Amino acid sequence: MPIIKITAWPFANEKSASLLIADVTRVIHNQLGCPLDKITVYIEEISPSRWGDGGIAGDNPDFKVKSRRMCYEDGE
């Protein structure tokens, strides 16, 4: 039966992670009809320094802006 992997930056608190697991399980159960005991959901947390978008690591102070760039600027 389904195994759902969620890859994300670390959650701010355990309750958020638990609620996400419960909500994803509920959706899979409702949409596919799988028995609850056959649905596995796990979260793999990745440190922002080990994650990047657009060539910019998530722990870069300018991540929100620089990760949305469309091309390299001269000198990069």
Image (cartoon, rainbow, N blue to C red):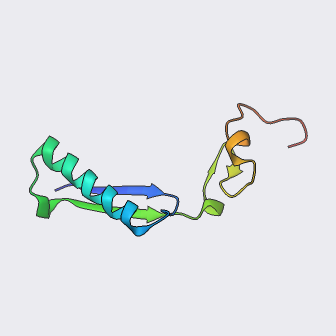
Classify 5 as above or below 13: above
State the image coordinates of residue 59 (x, y, percent, origin top left).
68, 58
Which one is nearer the viewer's eye here, 57 or 25? Answer: 25
Q: Nearer the viewer, residue 21 or 76?
A: 21
| Residue 44 relative to residue 57: left or right | left
| Residue at 48 percent of width and 56 percent of height | 8
Q: Is residue 3 left or right of residue 64?
A: left
Instruction: Please determine whether, in this image, residue 38 is positioned above or below residue 54.
Output: below
Measuring from the top left, give residue 53's x and y in whole percent. 63, 46
Q: Who is closer to the viewer here, 67 or 22? A: 22
Most extreme residue toward the right is: 75
Q: Which residue is rendered at x = 45% and y = 66% of the image?
A: 13
Relative image position of residue 1 (x, y in whole percent): 16, 56
Q: Residue at x 48, y 62 (%)?
A: 11
| Up-down relation of residue 63 to residue 3 (above or below) | above
Does 71 appear above or below 32? above
**Label total for image:** 0
Residue 67 sits in which quadrant? top right
Q: Point out residue 37 in the picture as x, y percentages from the top left corner.
A: 12, 64
- Tell me: 37 left or right of 56: left
Query: In the image, what residue occupies the spot 45% across and 56% down?
Result: 7
Residue 60, quarter of picture:
bottom right
